[in-house]
Image: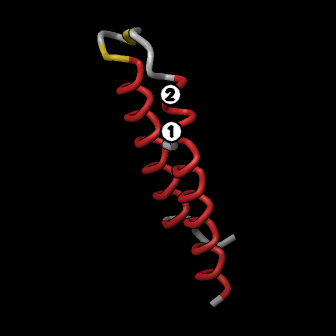
């Protein structure tokens, strides 16, 4: 039962990180007419954060016992 509790806490932490990174004040910082490898900066930021969150979720769920 203790492992489930830690996994739930990790998932909640990833949720909070995602909510902060995808919230309006931070998104407005990347809303500029600049391209990154031909992709608008805002789109690159959103997809980069999305990829990071998926990786963090996979790490939190698939973590083996210590």
Residue displayed at 37% across by 34% down: 47
Image quadrant containing the N terminus: bottom right
Residue 35 pos. (x, y %): 37, 10
Q: Is residue 5 left or right of residue 35?
A: right
Q: Which mark is residue 24?
A: 1
Residue 61 pos. (x, y %): 50, 67
- Say which of 51 and 59 sits in front: 51
- Say which of 29 and 40 sits in front: 29
Residue 43 pos. (x, y %): 35, 27
Q: Is residue 11 above or below residue 21?
A: below
Q: Quadrant of residue 39?
A: top left
Q: Is residue 45 above or below residue 61?
A: above
Residue displayed at 59% across by 57% down: 16
Q: Is residue 46 left or right of residue 10?
A: left
Residue displayed at 50% across by 38% down: 24
Asked which secondary structure carries label 2, the reply is: helix
């Amino acid at each position: 039962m203790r492992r489930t509790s830690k996994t739930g806490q990790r998932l909640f932490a990833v949720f909070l990180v995602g909510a902060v990174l995808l919230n309006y004040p931070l998104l407005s910082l990347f809303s500029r007419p600049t391209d990154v490898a031909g992709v608008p900066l805002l789109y690159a930021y959103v997809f980069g954060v999305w990829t990071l969150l998926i990786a963090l979720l996979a790490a939190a769920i698939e973590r083996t016992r210590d």
